[in-house]
Structure formats: structure tokens, C-alpha cells
């Protein structure tokens, strides 16, 4: 490195440089694109349908998708290391099943919550250990995890089990009043807390920075002496924890446990993460983007429920198209960097 | 004996054999095949017939995986194939004519080939990771199928169409004959010509094989079109077997079964080599497992649990790390064997 001395070139470019300094850093671009998409969709909805942009409608996006935000947070951590977790949907179903059946068996609510969270985390831990120590692709290990969790659901019961526990039902019915007569549910608060913790953890802690480093290049991270093993296993524990927490929120949302709950939800979570601007190759992305991705998915659903003429299958098609657009943009983006 | 154990197909064949043995012990009538109206009936025939769609898709998946890719959209393509053919058939003035059935099936296969071209375009031309490129169609595909059938389960009544999935020819189910014919043609094409080696070359290193003069982009593209073709035919079988197109449930999770069959058959997910015989055994293993579980008195829903155990066991057997830990002697990969010689 040589000392930098200002030249005429620099001075001439200073105006645009100053502009560039005002512009947000490059890593925020994908999230800004998602945010723009979200605002654009809300705007389009507001023009087309009356009452679309009422604050309660927007708050309902959070209310109806709180569990998906939690799920997407865990998935983001995994994808940031370059992995993938296909088991999350099944773990959500297993958690609702575990919660419903243990509550029916008379366990106290607090113990149920602990047991469910522990089960999800242990499942994640096991998958992480197999992925890291036996060097098997995350895709196939979490696929096995997906089968395992679904199979365990059926082992507990084939029928749907209703949840009647007073603690759970009061949590489900509970609302938090906001000024102006609007409300959110406690689940939203849980989701936002998880989001905040994840954002803080990813950017402020050594563990979080290691996640980005491992995703950028595992080999380099290893040579730098970072705790690669702990990080790679750790993200699957986080994802397992988040899935079981999302499962608890989902069981409160549905007030039942059922082995067919959340079929294909892992795809929604992955779609939200991709639309949120996280690179599937790992190493780049923000957890806030994933939350915005969830809101975009929620907005598509709101669109369809506001428009009486559109059928529910348009949700899937639109999500597919959005996925495509973002994946192609990502591809062009990474190709230019390379 | 040692060379038998070292054979790559030793473990899959052993697993299938053990499974058949369990059946023999649990239900002695398992192997009995009776002739009725000139058709063969029995558990084994059922396994062959019901396993035909999985076998076909696993065949396509083998080639895709050999190029180091993966195709998650096959289940969606199955649904679309059924939806297109049944919707076209049901909309006909003369629903039961043979010509109409042939047009319907050709139309379905044509649409699915276009979808395969699309997947191949994303992977081979745009260079998007296969798992993500096909995730797009996996997500959107069922929506498209619902769009075609207008969200209804379309039932049809056409004798020729029904024969594809449920009919018999020379006493054997037509579905398995079609599947075996396609497997055979593929085996000849890949093992009697250089095509198989070129596919493996692309799987080992697409860039290096391109520099060596292999048209790696065309080959990658072709395997995605081929798996779409396989899925289309499988979709026709499934729709024909029930005489209905169910956009929501046709071929649900079939991509996972196909991947499982390929992995059980000894084809490495890392690409670069493949075994069609292994895939055949893998597909039959999965179908036999699905048949065995209810017959020995375990609820069929726990199928998933067994599949999970099988996936983990097979992967551990394939993983060099696990083998080092367990000290299981398995054939060395081709490269090291070559260097020893």
C-alpha cells in the first residue's frame, strides 16, 4: 500500500465521490430492491383496491406471517453459510404435533414450550453434526431430516389434535393494542424480537461474522483459524430452534397439531430468503431482507384475497415468477463481480 | 466373495433381497403370482406397476445427477402432464376416441418438453445453480397445473388413455413395459455410445470437458429435457391409473423418491458417474418398502421414518469420512483405482 496523495483526477471526481458516499453501501442494494418491490406492491394494491393500504391490513401481514418470519430468520443463517435446510416445514409440523399431544397429556405449558424448542434444536444439532463431520451435502441430510420429522408426526398421531390449554389459547386470542385502534398479536412481538436478535447477532458478534466468512469461502475461513465447525453446526441448531419456535407460533395460530401442517413451508421460507436478496451461494445477505421477503409473499396473498376473481393458485405462480426474477438478477450481479 | 462385496451394486441388491425376505417371512403369499383373465396379478406385479413412474423419473434424475445437477421440478411436471392430457381429453366432444387420447398425450409430452427446455436454459445457459433453477418451476408448476385444471380434479373416460397406467400387455402391466423400454433405450444410448461418458465428463468438470471439445452446454441442456420427458410419461401413467388429473397431489414428493432411488443405486450426488442398474434396483427398493410396511402391520404413514433411516444409512455408507471411521471396505472411486493400476 502506498500513501494516498490527492491528484487532479481525485479532485475532479470529488463531487460524484461525495454522492457515492451518501449512497448506501452495495450490500444494501438487494434489500433496497426488495423494499422497493414491497412498497410498489402495496402502492399498486392501494390504487386497485379500496382499503388495501390501511395500516391494519399491513399489520395483518405481520400477524398472519409471524411464524414464517421466524422460519426465514433461521433459514437465512443456514443459507448465509452456503447450506440449505429442507427440514423446516416438517419440524414445524412436528412441533405443533408435540405441543398438542403433550398439552393433551396434561403437561404444563412452560414445560411444553421448553420440550418443543429442545426437540427442534437437537434435531438441528444432529443434522449439523452429520453435515459437517461426515461431509454429506446439506441438501440430502436435511431431506432425511424432513422425512424423519414427518414420520415422527405420524408416529404421534394421524389425526389432528386440537389445543385447548388455557395458556396457549389466551396467547392465541391475545392482542396488543396500538395507538389508533390498531392491533398486533403477541406472536408478532416474538417474531420481531427474533428478527432483532438475529440482526444483532449476525453483525455484532464474532459468531455472526464467522457465518458470513464461512459462506464467503469455507477454505479461507478455515485458514484464518475461524471456528468453522462450530459455526456450521451452529446454524443448523439455530434453524432447528427457529423452526420449532415457528412451530409453536403456528400451533397457536391454528390451535391444533396436525401432521399435514406446513407441507411445503420450507419452499416459502427459501423463497422469502431469496426474494430478500440473500445469495444462495452464501456469504451475502441481510436477515432484514428475508423479513421483507416474507412480507412480499404475504402481500401476494393479500392481493388475491382482495381480488375476488383471482384464485389461490396464482400465489404459487407469482412466487415462482418473483423467485425467477430475483435469481436471475442475483446471477447477473454475481457474474459481474466475478 | 470379496470381489462380490466390492461390487458397487452389492449393497443395493442386498438391501432389496433382505426386504423381499422380510416379506416372504411376514406374508408367505407375497411371491405368489396368479393368472386372471390372461393378466398376471400379485404383490410383485403391483410393485412393478406402481413403481413405474418413480423408476422413470429416477432414470432421468440419474442422468441429471451425473452432470452434478438436480431437478426438483419433476413432481410439478408430473402434475402438469396429467392436467394437460386430462383437460384436453375432457374437453373433447368424443371423449373416448383413440385419436383424441393420442393427441392429448402428445400434447402433454410436448408441453413438458418445453418445461424441460426452460429448466435446461436456466441451468446450462444462465448458469443458475440447478437446485434453485428448478425450485422456480417446483414452486410455480403446481400453480400452473391448477390453472390448467381450474382447480378441479378432472376425471376422464377413455379406454386407450386408461391402458397406459392400468392396462396389461402380454400379461404384464403396460406401465412397467413402457418404463423398461425407456430404461433400455437409455442404457443402450449411454453405455453403447460415448454419450454416457460425455455426461460423466460434464459432471466431473463442465469447464474442462468444454475445453476438451465436449459440448457440455448442449449435454446439460439435453438431460433436463430428458428428465422432463420422463416426468411427462410418468405423469400420464399416474393420471391414467386413476383416470383423473389431481393437480395438488399427483406426483407429490416424487422428486424425493427419485433422488432417493438414485442415491440408493450408488450414483454419487457429487456427479461424474452413474449406474442405471443401480437406479432400477433403488426404485424397486423404494416401491417394495412402500408395499412392505403396511403388509407387515406398520401404519403406512411411517414410511417417511423408514425412508429417513435409509437415506442416512446410504449416505453414511457413501461418505469417505464415515467409511474411514467405520473402516468399512468399499471399492475405491474410479480415479484412485486407475492410479493404482
Image: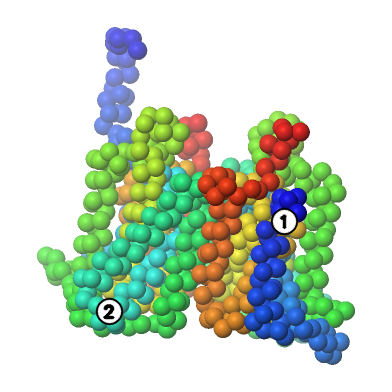
Residue name at image x 30 percent, y 63 percent: A118
Residue name at image x 56 percent, y 66 percent: B307
Residue highlighted by disc 1: B9
Residues beneath discs 2 and 1 located on the same chain = no
How many marks can you see? 2
Residue highlighted by disc 2: A103
Q: Chain of mark 1?
A: B
| Quadrant assignment, res B333 | top right
| Quadrant assignment, res B289 | bottom right
Camera-side residue of A187 and A27: A187
Helix, strand or loop at label 2? It is: helix
Q: Is residue A28 above or below residue B296?
A: above
Camera-side residue of A128 and B60: A128
| Residue A251 visible somewhere in the drawing | yes
Left or right side of B142 for B93: right
Instruction: Give the image location of residue A151, x and y in percent.
Output: 48, 71
Camera-side residue of B206 and A234: A234
Instruction: Give the image location of residue B33, x and y in percent.
Output: 79, 83
Left or right side of A95 for B174: right
Amino acid at each position: 500500500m502506498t500513501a494516498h496523495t490527492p491528484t487532479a483526477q481525485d479532485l475532479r471526481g470529488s463531487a460524484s465521490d461525495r454522492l457515492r458516499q451518501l449512497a448506501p453501501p452495495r450490500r444494501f442494494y438487494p434489500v433496497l430492491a426488495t423494499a422497493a418491490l414491497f412498497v410498489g406492491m402495496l402502492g399498486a394494491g392501494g390504487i386497485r383496491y379500496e382499503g388495501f393500504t390501511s395500516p391494519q391490513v399491513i399489520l395483518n401481514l405481520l400477524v398472519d406471517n409471524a411464524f414464517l418470519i421466524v422460519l426465514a430468520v433461521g433459514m437465512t443463517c443456514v443459507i448465509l453459510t452456503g447450506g440449505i435446510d429442507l427440514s423446516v416445514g416438517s419440524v414445524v409440523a412436528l412441533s405443533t404435533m408435540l405441543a398438542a399431544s403433550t398439552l393433551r397429556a396434561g403437561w404444563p405449558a412452560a414445560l411444553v414450550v421448553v420440550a418443543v424448542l429442545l426437540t427442534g434444536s437437537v434435531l438441528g444439532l444432529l443434522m449439523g453434526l452429520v453435515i459437517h463431520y461426515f461431509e454429506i451435502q446439506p441438501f440430502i441430510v436435511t431431506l432425511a431430516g424432513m422425512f424423519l420429522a414427518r414420520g415422527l408426526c405420524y408416529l404421534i398421531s394421524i389425526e389432528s389434535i386440537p389445543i385447548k390449554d388455557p395458556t396457549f389459547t389466551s396467547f392465541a386470542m391475545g392482542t396488543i393494542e396500538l395507538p389508533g385502534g390498531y392491533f398486533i398479536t403477541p406472536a408478532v412481538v416474538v417474531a420481531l424480537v427474533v428478527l432483532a436478535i438475529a440482526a444483532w447477532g449476525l453483525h455484532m458478534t464474532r459468531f455472526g461474522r464467522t457465518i458470513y466468512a464461512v459462506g464467503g469461502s469455507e477454505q479461507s475461513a478455515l485458514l484464518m483459524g475461524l471456528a468453522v465447525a462450530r459455526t456450521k453446526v451452529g446454524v443448523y441448531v439455530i434453524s432447528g430452534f427457529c423452526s420449532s419456535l415457528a412451530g409453536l407460533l403456528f400451533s397457536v395460530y391454528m390451535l391444533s397439531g396436525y401432521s399435514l401442517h406446513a407441507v411445503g413451508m420450507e419452499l416459502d421460507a427459501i423463497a422469502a430468503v431469496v426474494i430478500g436478496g440473500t445469495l444462495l451461494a452464501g456469504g451475502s445477505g441481510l436477515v432484514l431482507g428475508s423479513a421483507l421477503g416474507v412480507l412480499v409473499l404475504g402481500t401476494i396473498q393479500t392481493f388475491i384475497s382482495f381480488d375476488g376473481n383471482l384464485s389461490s393458485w396464482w400465489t404459487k405462480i407469482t412466487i415462482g415468477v418473483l423467485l425467477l426474477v430475483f435469481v436471475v438478477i442475483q446471477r447477473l450481479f454475481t457474474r459481474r463481480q466475478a | 466373495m470379496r470381489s462380490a462385496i466390492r461390487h458397487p451394486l452389492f449393497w443395493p441388491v442386498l438391501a432389496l433381497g433382505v426386504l423381499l425376505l422380510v416379506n416372504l417371512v411376514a406374508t408367505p403369499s407375497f411371491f405368489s403370482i396368479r393368472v386372471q383373465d390372461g393378466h398376471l396379478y400379485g404383490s410383485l406385479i403391483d410393485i412393478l406397476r406402481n413403481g413405474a413412474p418413480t423408476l422413470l423419473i429416477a432414470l432421468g434424475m440419474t442422468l441429471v445427477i451425473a452432470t452434478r445437477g438436480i431437478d426438483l421440478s419433476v413432481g410439478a411436471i408430473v402434475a402438469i402432464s396429467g392436467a394437460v392430457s386430462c383437460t384436453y381429453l375432457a374437453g373433447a366432444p368424443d371423449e373416448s376416441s383413440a385419436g383424441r387420447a393420442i393427441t392429448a398425450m402428445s400434447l402433454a409430452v410436448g408441453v413438458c418438453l418445453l418445461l424441460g427446455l426452460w429448466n435446461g436454459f436456466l441451468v446450462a445457459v444462465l448458469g443458475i445453480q440447478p437446485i434453485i433453477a428448478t425450485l422456480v418451476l417446483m414452486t410455480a408448476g403446481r400453480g400452473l397445473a391448477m390453472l390448467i385444471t381450474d382447480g378441479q380434479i378432472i376425471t376422464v373416460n377413455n379406454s386407450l388413455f386408461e391402458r397406459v397406467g392400468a392396462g396389461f400387455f402380454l400379461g404384464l402391466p403396460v406401465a412397467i413395459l413402457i418404463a423398461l423400454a425407456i430404461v433400455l433405450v437409455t442404457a443402450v444410448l449411454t453405455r453403447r455410445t460415448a454419450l454416457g461418458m460425455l455426461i460423466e465428463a460434464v459432471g466431473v468438470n463442465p469447464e474442462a470437458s468444454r475445453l476438451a471439445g465436449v459440448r457440455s452446454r448442449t449435454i446439460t441442456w439435453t438431460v433436463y429435457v430428458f428428465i422432463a420427458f420422463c416426468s411427462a410419461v410418468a405423469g400420464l401413467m399416474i393420471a391414467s391409473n386413476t383416470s383423473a388429473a389431481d393437480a395438488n397431489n399427483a406426483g407429490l414428493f416424487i422428486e424425493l423418491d427419485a433422488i432417493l432411488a438414485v442415491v440408493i443405486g450408488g450414483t454419487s450426488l457429487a456427479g461424474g458417474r452413474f449406474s442405471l442398474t443401480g437406479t432400477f434396483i433403488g426404485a424397486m427398493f423404494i416401491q417394495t418398502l412402500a408395499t412392505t410396511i403396511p403388509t407387515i402391520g406398520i401404519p403406512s404413514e411411517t414410511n417417511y421414518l423408514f425412508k429417513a433411516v435409509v437415506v442416512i444409512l446410504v449416505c453414511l455408507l457413501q461418505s469417505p469420512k464415515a467409511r474411514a471411521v467405520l473402516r468399512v471396505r468399499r471399492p475405491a472411486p474410479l480415479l484412485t483405482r486407475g492410479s493404482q493400476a
